[in-house]
Amino acid sequence: MQVVKVSKRVIIRNFVIAMLCVAFGWYLKAKITPQGSMMMGGAQGAAHVLVEEALLKDVSPQKQYIAAVEPIKSVNLIPQVSGYIEKVLFQEGSIVQEGDVLFIIEQDRYLANVDLAKAALTSAQANFVRAERDYNRQKALSTKQYASKSTLDTAESAYLQAKAAVAQAKANLELAQIDLMHTEIKAPISGKIGKALVTEGNLVSSNSVTLARIVQNSPIRVAFSVPDKDHYALKTFKSGELRTRLSLPDNSILEENALSAFIDNEINPNTATLAVYLEYENSSNQLIAGNYVDVIVSSANETKQVIINPAAVMQDANGAYVFTVNDEGLVTEQRVKLDGTFEGKQIVLEGLKGGEKVIVNGLQKAKDGASVRASLISDDSKEAK
């Protein structure tokens, strides 16, 4: 077996190549991982913290009540005369105006009744003229003592009966005309009409069935009940010191101002609550009768204060403070004066103006004058860069 001797120069060359490969590997790692590069240099990376924006918001006290939407006016259309439905003159689910003709009940019979009543009136008027002339003649003869008292009395009685017959014929004519008028069923109010409950060709009787229903949608009323202890605060409705907002079923807010408001005249003894009624124009038709909404009652005079996440507040012997971060990532300790809470947030009376970014997570890594990497989180706790 032949033994190959490796020269000292070859060994040194291989060692140098190995060291260069190791160094190149560390260089690539530093390029790919910046933190690794910083560690190689012996420097610590900037701490990562989460921040929230200090908000300037109206913190006026407010109350919230469950309320029912109800129409101020609603009408069930009920026939006043009997007959077959000849025509239905509206589109179901549409808006109708007061005075619109909606149904027509067969009119021929009622037109004939009007003609009969007119004829009866004419006959009664003719009889009255004859009776009046006879009475006047008998009265003149009686004055001259040419006619007996009994004859005059008979003529007077016939005259009065004829006069009454004319009045009765006029009343019958008016009734016939009213019945004819009721063959056209008109909308007594403006509003939204629902389904036609009786269609053409069906026989209806007087006061027997509802033909359709109209519900007023503008203006509309919102009704809710308040505990008796809240009654005195709500008295300021009329003076305009309170404002109301409506939270709709889809969680959107209707900012429309109430046209008027009134409080019921007695407390419900079973619930110890008092009913309150608000009237809205409902120009956007977002309020639907029968629906439920939340009424948010607050002061009409806004009180704006800065609010922050309570997690941002620190305490020491000198009081409360927070850490804020500017756009360059520089941390500043900010002394604050606190008040109560609003919607789960801490109210800040002094020390912040609103818009500052306060640290809420990673406070143990922060100190005054330090540099940090800050990520903004929203109120729903989702990170936003």
Image: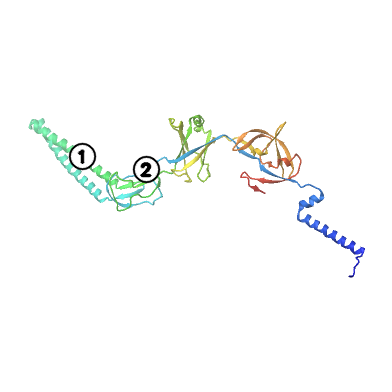
- In the rendered image, residue 157, in percent from the top left (x then y), is placed at 14, 34
Circle 2: element type: strand
Circle 1: element type: helix
Residue type at numbered disc 2: Val
Query: What colouring method underlies this structural image?
Result: rainbow
The quarter of the image holding the N terminus is: bottom right
Q: Are marks 1 and 2 in contact (CB under 8 Å)?
A: no
Residue type at numbered disc 1: Gln
Cα separation, mark 1 vs mark 2, equals 33 Å
Looking at the picture, tell me which residue is in the foreground, 212 or 91.
212
Q: Is residue 298 above or below residue 47?
A: above
Q: Give the residue at x 66% y 43%.
A: 52
Looking at the picture, tell me which residue is in the foreground, 157 or 63.
63
- In the rendered image, residue 164, in percent from the top left (x then y), is placed at 19, 37
Between disc 1 and disc 2, whose residue precedes? 2
Query: Is residue 305 rendered to the left or right of residue 166?
Result: right
The residue under label 1 is: 168
Query: Is residue 4 rendered to the left or right of residue 256?
Result: right
Q: Which mark is residue 75?
A: 2
| View extreme (right): residue | 8
- Can residue 133 be seen here? yes
- In the rendered image, residue 89, in percent from the top left (x then y), is placed at 35, 51
Q: Is residue 279 above or below residue 11?
A: above
Q: Nearer the viewer, mark 1 or mark 2?
A: 2
Query: Is residue 229 rendered to the left or right of residue 123?
Result: right
